[in-house]
Amino acid sequence: MRRFPSALASLVALLVAVYFLIPLIWLVMSTAKSTGQLFSDFGLWFSWPLHWNLSWAGMVAFEHGVVGRWFLNAVLYSGVVALLSTLISAMAGYAFSHFQFPLKGLLNLLVLGSVLIPFTALVLPIFLILHALGLLNTYLAVILPSLVSPLGVYLMALFWEQSFPMDLRDAAYMDGAGEWTVFARIGLPLVRNGLVTVALFSFVGTWNNFFLPLVVLSKGSLYPITLGLAVWNSTVQAGSSVNYPAILMGALVSVLPLILAFFWLQRYWQAGLTVGAIK
Amino acid sequence: MRRRLTPYLFLLPFFIPFLVFYVASILYAVYLSLFVQHGLRPPIYVGIQNYLRVLSDANFGSSLLTILKFGVIQIPLMLLIALLLALYLDGLKSAGWRAFLSGSYFLPYAMPSVIGGLLWGYLYSKGISPFDQVLSGLGLKLNFLGSRGLLWSLGNIITWTWTGYNMVILYAALRSVPAEVYEAARIDGATSGQVVRYIKLPMVAPALLLAALFSVIGTLQIFAEPFVLQSLTYVPTDLTPNLYIYVTAFNYGNFNYAAALAVSLSVITFIFSLAMLWLQSWQRRRW
């Protein structure tokens, strides 16, 4: 009796999965087409012969390989931010979880309150202050504001609490270890899961951030790949003789690192989202 | 003495950029919002005049109204789908099937919003869109990016991006129910419908409210998706508050007024957050 509804539910669940995958499936198929085939053939199937090499060549040829530069810029922004932001979040989280100090309550409230401030709301104020500091159109304009992650501090504090017992820390003090040694040599390896989680979110968050680079960068050579593609796409729409498959190949290249990170680090995603949400 | 300074030293690398980009930037925006500047002449202090202008700004009002109407339909729909998916995954026995499904549902969250917007933009475009190809084959003509379809199409992009994220949060809340609770309910002869109604739903209620809070905040901030759709179709510049703020600052170069708009939007977002948090504490007291 229960067979039929459960088979139906499985079918619906599968169709929903297809819905979420369609843009990526379409992307993979479309990068294998010529511009003509993109318009003449059915969108959700392959057109033979497969032209991935042509759309790749078209992407590489665009403005003497600027797409490669955009890709490397994105790697640089996201890599540096992930590394530094994780370290400073780990340090701040450690201070909140393992120390008592007079300003603790106030500072903690400040950080927690900021979790609710969407980064998007800060972009214009950040632009204005970067302008005042003379930092517009530099790598730092993207990196410095992205280093601040109140959610990262909050997550790290939770991970510290769970993974680094006070007794263990006190034992390390007894052995004569200094504060930095206790933090870096004994503590950090114990919160490895937290570090990976925060680094993952900060890498992906920086890779996917569009509003900030759009506003603080006007030099094309500094663009990360998402911004570069959006600009390429909009200039191309205004002009003629559009090489759509080349743009789409760029889009595919821009999401590949994310898809890899997604499958490789899948369990950390869930940890990062739920530790914060359930508490 | 040394130990008393230690926590502050650990906090310093975080708080320096925090103070510059979260605190000082907001204060500086508030400061700038109190001036007007015409051309290259020096700025003039005008007090709250910019804010009075915000209150009577038809474009800003219309952007808020649009996004509110949008959220009233999109957020409940998205959360309902996320809840149903979470309940379904929670009831599954096959771990492999569950991993495949939850992975597929969650994948869009890892995609850049620009790329999501770009891909859906193409999937909406006449001639390229496989949906359009099928529909026009059936003799139907739908303009996904026309003035009447635009908000629905945007709603689809946002739903596509965020449903999986909300599902993960709700699913984790369901998982946190101890197995003994289900065991006890089963012994008492509860049907699976009763388990959902009396155990699972109350257990996910706080997570659901939290998801709603983040959805409301996120909806007020929508920017990248309508921004990239601009290259494919006509998007009114007052479609979302952030689009209007961007245009005011960077197309019209009116940074003082844009700062007033941004501060106003932050205040509105903050009020919504407080209201939702108050709702949450009220709900906690009830259950």
Image (cartoon, grey):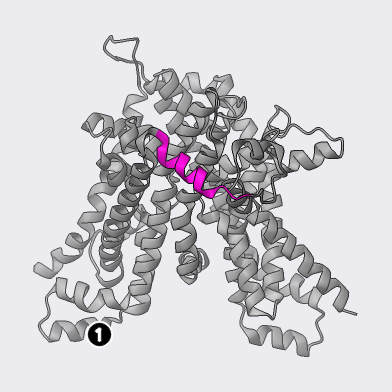
**Element assignment for label 1:** helix
Magenta region: which residues? A49-62
Name the spot of residue B95 as percent of width and height, x first: 63, 79
- Reading the image, the residue beneath label 1 is A168
Res. A264 in view? yes
Kind of residue indicated by mark 1 = Leu
Q: Is residue B50 above or below residue A204?
A: above
The residue that appears at 40% across and 19% down in the rendered structure is B254
Above or below A28: residue A271: below
Furthest residue toward front? A49
Q: Position of residue A249 (x, y in %)?
A: 50, 45
Q: Assign the magenta stretch its main secondary structure.
A: helix
Q: Quadrant of the N terminus of chain A?
A: bottom right
Q: Which chain letter goes with mark 1?
A: A
Q: Is residue B22 left or right of residue B179?
A: left
Q: Residue A191's x, y, as percent? A: 33, 74
In front here: B143 or B186?
B143
- In the depicted structure, whether residue A95 falls above or below residue B161: below
The residue sitting at 87% across, 74% down in the picture is: A4
Q: Is residue A50 magenta?
A: yes
